[in-house]
Image: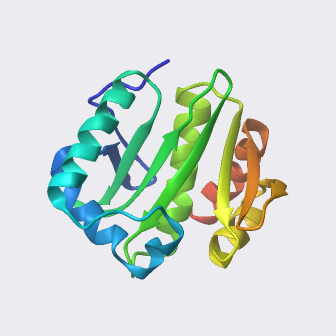
Amino acid sequence: MKIPSNFEINKYDLQVRLVNENDASFILNLRSENKARFLSAVAHDAELQKQWIHQYKIREQAGLDYYFIYYKNGIPLGLNRIYNIKEDSFVGGSFIFTSGCDFEIPILATLIEDYVGFEILGKSARFGNIHKDNKKAIKFNKLYGADFIYEDENEIFLITTKNMYCKIKEKLERVFNVS
């Protein structure tokens, strides 16, 4: 299963679509914030970002990677990717949201990421890695129910299964009164 190039969903009062070259400035601004310190560094050059997105769209068309942008009421709030897609798994990452957005937005975006990976793409496991200094992400993933499978000197590696997602999804939808 591949996600179509015109993919858009409205879930949990968030609008989600695939990133395009017009998003380059938003991406650069967001990734230049202090919270991007746990992501790969990028050059602050809009043309280079557009070229990177163009290459990403090729991988997207092949069903290898998907880069999402999240909106609420027409305002872009954040980004994340599903990548390294295998027969039965995917990796979720590059998760970053604007400063000051409501605390539940990244949580609901994680549910959407898992909805796409587990329910649309039909995978049974999501892998991820978190920099050891990213205490908020570590705490969140523990609360979300991810299993921490190993670590190296810089990162912690984790897995979330479809069953874990189904359990936490029910709880979080009740907590946030969404479906």
Tell me where residue 103 appears, x and y as whole percent: 51, 75
**Residue plotted at (15% across, 50% down):** 22
In this rendering, is residue 47 above or below 105?
above
**Residue plotted at (38% across, 29% down):** 59
- The one nearer the camera, 109 or 19, is 19
> Is any part of residue 178 visible from this angle?
no
**Splitting the image into 4 quarters, where does residue 141 fall?**
bottom right
Coloring scheme used: rainbow
> Is any part of residue 148 visible from this angle?
yes
**Splitting the image into 4 quarters, where does residue 131 fall?**
bottom right
How many dots with numbers? 0
In this rendering, is residue 27 above or below 149?
below
Tell me where residue 79 appears, x and y as whole percent: 40, 56
**Residue plotted at (31% across, 28% down):** 58
Residue furthest top in the image: 1
**Residue plotted at (66% across, 50% down):** 128
- The one nearer the camera, 140 or 128, is 128
Tell me where residue 179 appears, x and y as whole percent: 54, 48
In this rendering, is residue 127 above or below 135?
above
In the picture, measured across the screen, residue 62 lies left or right of residue 72, that is right
- The one nearer the camera, 109 or 157, is 157
In the picture, measured across the screen, residue 51 lies left or right of residue 84, that is left
- The one nearer the camera, 161 or 47, is 47
Tell me where residue 132 appears, x and y as whole percent: 70, 72
In the picture, measured across the screen, residue 58 lies left or right of residue 35, that is left
